[in-house]
Every structure is written in C-alpha cells, then in structure tokens.
Image: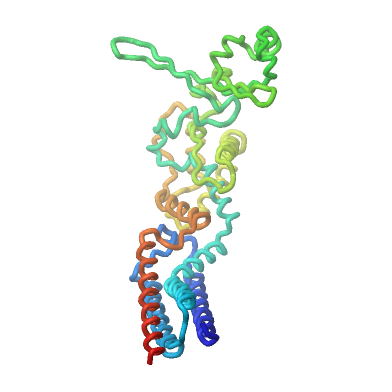
C-alpha cells in the first residue's frame, strides 16, 4: 500500500483511539459510586436502549460511513497485488473491531473509577469484617439448620475441631436409636522405624497419650509418611460440645461471607473463628458493640437497608451465649441480605473476573464485525478494480 493510504489508516486509528478515550472518560465520570452497584454493573451488556448504546450505534455508523467514503474517493484505483490487498483487509478488520468496541472502553472507565473509590485493601477489610461477624448475620430461621450450625463447624478453642462418631442401636423392627460422640482431632508424629517396633512405641508414646496400640489403630483417621517419619491423625479425647460452657451456637458456623482473594480459605476460617470467640468470651461486650457499629457503617456505605442497632444485637448475642440450651427464635439483625450478597458477588467479579463483553452477545458482536468488515472490504475491492480499469 502507498504512503497516502498508510497515513489515512494512521489518522483513522488516531480518531478511533480518541473516541475510545472519550468513552473511557464517559464511563469514568458516569460511575455513580459503590452504593449504586448492582448485578447490572458487572459488565456492560449493550442493552440497545440506554444513552451509551444509542450513541455507540450512531458514532460507529457515522465513523464507518465517512471512513468508507474517504477510502473509496481518495485511496482506490491502485494496482495492488493480492498480498497487499490481504494486508489492507487485515487493517480494515482492525478498524471494524475498534469501531464497534467503544462500549468496552466505557466499561474500563467504570471499573477504573470503582477501584479509585474502593481499593482492594479496603474491599478486603470489609470482607474480613463480614467473615468474622457472619454467624451473627443469618435470618433467625437459619439457626435451626443442622447443616449450617453444628459441632463439626467449631474451629476454636482447643480441643476443637472435633470429629463425630454416630452409634446406632436397634430398638425395634427397623427403628434405631442414634447417639453422637465427638472426639478431638489430634496429631501424632514419630519415626517410622519406631512405629514398627510395637513394644517401643507402646512404652514411650502410646501409654503417654492414654491408650495402647490396638486402640490407636481403631482411632486412626489418616496416616501419612513424611520422609523418615509417620504422621498419624487420630481421634483423641472425647468432647461434649452441648455441655461446654465456652461454646454457643454462634461458634458452630465456619462459613465465610466472602473469602479474601489470595489467602487460603482454611486460614481465613480459623482466623475468623478465633476473633469471633474472643469477641464473645474474652473481650468486654463493648468490643462486640464496636464491631457491630463497624458493620452498621459498612451497610450504610454500600447503601444497604438496615435496621441493626449495635447495642441491641450485642445484647441478643450475649443472651443466647448464656442460654445455649434455648432455641434461637429471634435476633435483631435485620438488613437487606439479598442486596448485600448481590453487591459483594458483583464487586468480587469486577475486581477479579471483569467481563467486558457479555457472553449473550459474543456471537452477535463478532458476527456484526465480520459482516461489516466483509461488506466494506468487498466494496473497496470492487471500487478499486473498477477505477483501475477505467
């Protein structure tokens, strides 16, 4: 291709980049704040009825129209080889793509403004607070769920966590009585050579932990060889969570509200359990009230409707801590749970899985680009040969 055509392509590319910059700034300044984020903010869907979609349609159409007019008028009729025509076709395909992707730059602008208002560090801090307070945030009907709240979810203090052993006893025909026994999960490490020496192990280690080799074998959960040692995880002492004065229902849930990215989930669960235990049993009630005040501030920051009064919620926690044998049938923790969950799931994707092109329009989007490119390229080839022949 000649120099004039190259310059024309360069100028066209500069114009497109300026338009993209305009849409980026438009998205940046149109962002309405983290309080207004919802599931539709996750990525721009090209909805065909908003101002961005409408302007996009006209801007793309006008640019391509003038582009085609100028290239046909000033840069056709040249004697190009097949290889050069392919190169021109490649440039035209790039022009077509840039002409139909302004909404992507708009989305980049929205995302950039989001991260300027809510840093990843601050977002993780909010998630950490919700992870610690998560067992206090369920609807009261959820506290009767044995799946969510049970002794196997207790991670702290020692000797927790525990493992459950269920014994069934036949009472009558097809009727069984079940009884659950809980044991601490303990670890024993020893040299593999010592483990093979029954007498040595029994006298030096197994007697020390309270039972012999036969009983140890019955209590083994798993056994793993690490270099010249063997690590045995076994059922240790019997634990009775229902009668434990340092355990209440709020410790029987290890679920994270929203895991912090890049930190092992198990570590987050344990750290949250330790903090939660200390808030309930070790620190003064003022510490729990302070954390509920932080929660109230967080909910207002994200514009979540809430009726939480920190002092009242702390009183409810204190009551059910001291009355663990009672059914939790009321706790004053009302807020819009659905809105908060949707908002944090959307923020999670915007931070770590930004999708600037909705999957429902991918086929249509690339189809339009290819069709428009093909039409433009064929028109250019026809005009080029027609003017060259003339």
Residue at the (45%, 26%) spot, across then down: 325
- The answer to whether residue 323 of the structure is visible from this angle is yes
Say whether residue 235 is left or right of residue 226: left
Give percent across and percent down for residue 331: 43, 40
- The answer to whether residue 279 of the structure is visible from this angle is no
Residue at the (51%, 68%) spot, across then down: 109
Residue 312 vs residue 209, the one in the foreground = 209
Residue most toward the top? 199
Say whether residue 122 is left or right of residue 81: right
Which quadrant of the view contains residue 115? Answer: bottom right
Looking at the image, residue 55 lies above or below residue 295: below
Give percent across and percent down for residue 369: 39, 70
Residue 129 vs residue 375, the one in the foreground = 375
Colour scheme in use:
rainbow
Give percent across and percent down for residue 241: 51, 24
Quadrant in which the C terminus appears: bottom left
Residue 390 vs residue 62, the one in the foreground = 390
Say whether residue 219 is left or right of residue 63: right
Q: Number of labelled discs?
A: 0
Looking at the image, residue 59 lies above or below residue 321: below
Residue most toward the bottom? 390
Looking at the image, residue 311 lies above or below residue 18: above
Give percent across and percent down for residue 285: 57, 39
Looking at the image, residue 386 lies above or below residue 287: below
């Amino acid at each position: 291709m000649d120099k004039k055509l190259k310059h024309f392509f360069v100028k066209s590319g500069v114009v497109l980049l300026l338009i993209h910059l305009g849409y980026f700034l438009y998205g940046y300044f149109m962002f309405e704040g983290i309080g207004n984020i919802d599931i539709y903010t996750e990525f721009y869907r090209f909805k065909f009825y908003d101002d961005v979609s409408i302007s996009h349609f006209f801007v793309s159409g006008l640019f391509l129209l003038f582009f085609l007019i100028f290239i046909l008028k000033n840069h056709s009729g040249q004697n190009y080889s097949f290889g050069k025509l392919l190169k021109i076709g490649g440039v035209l395909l790039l022009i077509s793509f840039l002409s139909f992707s302004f909404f992507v730059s708009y989305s980049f602008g929205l995302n950039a403004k989001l991260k300027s208002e809510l840093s990843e560090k601050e977002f993780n801090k909010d998630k950490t607070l919700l992870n610690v307070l998560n067992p206090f945030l369920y609807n009261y009907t959820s506290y009767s769920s044995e799946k969510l709240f049970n002794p196997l979810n207790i991670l702290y203090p020692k000797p927790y966590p525990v493992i459950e052993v269920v014994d069934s006893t036949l009472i009558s025909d097809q009727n069984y009585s079940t009884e659950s026994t809980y044991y601490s999960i303990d670890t024993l490490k020893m040299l593999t050579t010592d483990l093979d020496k029954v007498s040595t192990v029994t006298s030096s280690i197994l007697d020390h932990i309270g039972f012999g080799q036969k009983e140890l074998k019955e209590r083994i959960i798993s056994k793993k060889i690490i270099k010249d040692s063997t690590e045995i995880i076994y059922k240790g002492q019997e634990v009775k969570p229902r009668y434990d004065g340092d355990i209440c229902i709020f410790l029987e849930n290890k679920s994270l509200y929203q895991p912090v990215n890049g930190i092992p989930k198990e570590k987050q669960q344990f750290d949250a359990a330790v903090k939660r235990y200390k808030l309930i049993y070790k620190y003064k009630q003022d510490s729990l009230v302070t954390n509920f005040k932080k929660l109230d501030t967080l909910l207002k920051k994200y514009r979540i409707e809430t009726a939480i009064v920190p002092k009242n919620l702390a009183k409810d926690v204190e009551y059910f801590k001291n009355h663990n044998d009672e059914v939790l049938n009321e706790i004053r923790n009302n807020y819009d749970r659905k809105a908060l969950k949707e908002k944090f799931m959307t923020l999670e994707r915007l931070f770590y899985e930004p999708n600037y092109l909705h999957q429902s329009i991918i086929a249509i989007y690339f189809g339009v680009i290819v069709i428009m490119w093909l039409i433009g390229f064929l028109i250019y080839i026809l005009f080029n040969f027609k003017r060259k022949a003339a």
